[in-house]
Amino acid sequence: MTTNVKSLNDLIELASAKRFLDVEPAEEMGLAEPLVFPYLSIVGQQDMKVALLLALINPHIGGVLLIGPRGTGKTTAVRSLTDLMPVVQRSRCEYGCMPDDIETSGIDSVCPNCAQRYAQGESLTYTDQVRLFELPLNSGLEDVVGGIDERAAVHQRLRLRRGILARADQNVLYVDEINLLGDDIIDAILDAAAQGTYSVHRGALVATYRARFVLIGSMNPEEGRLRPQILDRFGLRVIVRGLEHRSDRLEAYRRTMAFRNNPRKVIQEYTEATVLFRDELELARERLPQVTLTKQSETLGLKLIKELGVDSLRAEITLFEAARAYAIADGREHANPQDIRTVAPTSLRLRRSQFMQDYISSVSKEEAEIHELLKTKKRSPEKKSQRK
Ligand SMILES: [Zn+2]
């Protein structure tokens, strides 16, 4: 794989520099498949574009939360990722048996069918592209985690049906307006995202599902807040604002209209760059395990976190994992202090909890009082004994 392009930013800028000056007339096409706006055609919004790509390169970053008002292209950007999705190995079996299970826990860790297939040298997996799942806004907890299969219940059998989280395994899950979901649903999604598995208990039935997905959430702070402890559970947090420069706004308008009038033409114009870009991302994912942090970048990262007064260890995980992803996207196998500086704002913002800070300061005041009291209590018996 040889290209002249060195970094994610180069790639984004190279492709985004393409201008759309002519708007072609509309064509009749009776669209059957959804056509997505090319990622590389999105004007500006560098922070958002880079954050989304880093999350695809390194799932350990812990997902992305896009925060901003409506109409700033959050959903468009997420949907545009479809063309850039990497490939993964998926299980051929409904129980999700994987060859790794056999390698780590022996042949009994897979179902009898898969054990037989494995013994015959057949593959338990197939190669598939990562897909984008969108959580419908009106989803209930049962839709999300799964529940009793009603079709099976009619035949007086009890069976569990997979929920959205299980189907999102090894995919990207997009939750638009996450701040409008019920707390129980948000908690289920975040727990599954953090652990990579979840269990459903319904009466005597228990099922455990794999749920290793990259979580992308979006929220409009004008329409309801997100609990502070939830903000901390997203890896990267991007503040998405409207485009600032008039020329960018005009260009964004032109590209939007060009796409609305003739989406296939626009997609075609970006196909070559998109394919190149996807290959670069795939390569970055493959090489990620080799990337190390330099001593200086570790020191800088820890210093930033300490000075900001962030308690959560998720700060270190996201900051360092994002810096590693950024370095490899730039073609380097050492993440340096500049990588830390680049990813620090999205990794560290909105992690401090005002509640915890107030709580800790009130606790330490009380703690000081207790210590003071203990000192005087200790002194008094001594004095008495001296008097004797
Ligand atoms: Zn199986």
Image (cartoon, rainbow, N blue to C red):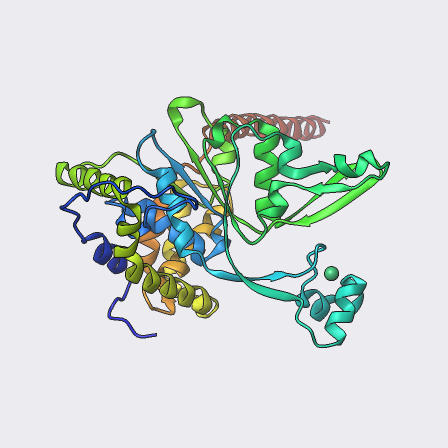
Q: Residue at left 44%, top 64%?
A: 285
Compared with 379, 145 (above or below) is below
Tell me which image quadrant ligand 1 sits in: bottom right
> Residue 55's x, y, as percent?
43, 52
Figure label count: 0
Could you say which is closer to the camera, residue 54 or residue 129?
Answer: 129
Q: Residue at left 24%, top 56%?
A: 15
For the question of whether residue 76 can be seen, the reply is yes
Q: Residue at left 78%, top 61%?
A: 111
> Residue 83's x, y, as percent?
39, 54
Q: Quadrant of residue 242?
A: top left
Q: Quadrant of residue 331?
A: bottom left
> Residue 361's x, y, as percent?
49, 29
Q: Quadrant of the N terminus?
A: bottom left
Q: Residue furthest toward the top?
A: 223
Could you say which is closer to the camera, residue 200 or residue 79?
Answer: 79
Left/right placement of residue 362 relative to residue 3 reads right
